[in-house]
Image (cartoon, rainbow, N blue to C red):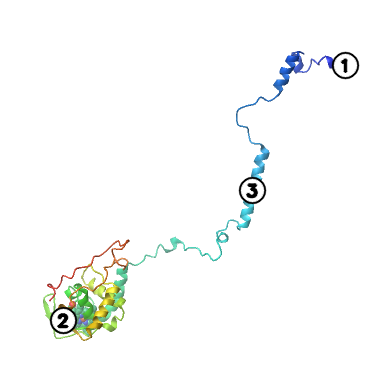
Amino acid sequence: MSDSLNKPDMSRVDYREGADVQEQHAIAAREKDEPISASHPVSLTLFFLCAILLLAGGAFYGQMTGGFNFTQLTPSGYTMAPDPRAGVKKVEKAWFEEQLAAGSTIYKTCGGCHKSAGEGDPAQNIPPLAGSEWVTGNTERLALIILNGMKGPVEVEGKVWSGNNMASQAASVPTPEKLAAIMNYVRHNFGNETDVWVSEEMAAEAMKISEERGGGQTTAEELNSAHDKMLPGEAIDKQTGKPAGGAEGGDATPAEPAQTEAEAA
Ligand code: HEC
């Protein structure tokens, strides 16, 4: 036995090279891993630990929120905004289109006399609205004709009309909304065109002026001497019906200056 201790077993690989002490040390030193300056792979243990933590965390969060369900995630009392695609087909009518639609209904009461195309009725001494300066001109005159009626001779498009008279139509336009609608309708129909749209504010002013006037049918003479002007009120954007010239006033229609005195009969 002692023999075998002192004499290394030369059949073992390491010892084959020799029994020299220094050589043996060198051999022992080689057995250790050489330190390397490269990234080491992450240990599998750490990898699986992270994976388990992520899975467990995700499962816990999912469970607490009802499986990431939207309705469960929203606080109580919160209502979902309507789907913006739902209203795509519904095109909002421009303000002026609503005015023309409302005005055409009211015009049925005028149309019995002034006829459906505003051509008037010569047989009944009823003047036309188509091409009439009383219609497309200054708005205060037109409003007062509608609210108070008219009598006496009136010149329309170079022809003098008399022999008939118009009673007050105030009952057909009891509100500023309706008065504005009928005015806008006759001012933008039968081939009539004007830049100015009558707002409810202007129509309300017309009602005040009519009240102060004190009733009774108007005459061409009175209208031209006292009421040949535009109704007060801010010019409005015909798309929105809101005052033009505001921050977002896109299609503004500037107010028409009151310059028809000379042209009106
Ligand atoms: C019962 C028949 C009758 C009805 C209804 C009537 N008018 Fe008249 N209108 C007349 C007559 C007649 C005159 C001319 C009055 C005159 O000779 O002084 C006239 C004159 C006018 C004038 C001035 C002249 C011209 O032709 O431009 C306007 C504007 C007018 N009417 C608008 C209207 C509007 C708007 C309505 C409906 C809200 C209406 N009228 C309803 C009979 C009518």
Q: Is mark 3 within 8 Å of ligand 1?
A: no
Residue 110 image-quadrant placement: bottom left
Q: Amino acid at mark 2?
A: Glu
In this rendering, would 44 be left or right of 91?
right
Give the residue number, with chain letter if any, for mark 3. 55
Picture coordinates of residue 60, whole percent (x, y): 64, 53
Give the residue number, with chain letter if any, for mark 2. 222
| Distance of label 2 from label 3 (alpha carbons) | 90 Å
Pointer 1 or 3: first along the chain? 1
Q: Amino acid at mark 3?
A: Leu
**CB-based contact (under 8 Å), mark 1 and mark 3:** no
Element type where label 2 sits in the image: helix
Q: Amino acid at mark 1?
A: Ser
Give the residue number, with chain letter if any, for mark 1. 2
Residue at (63, 50) in percent of width and height: 57
Q: Is mark 2 within 8 Å of ligand 1?
A: no
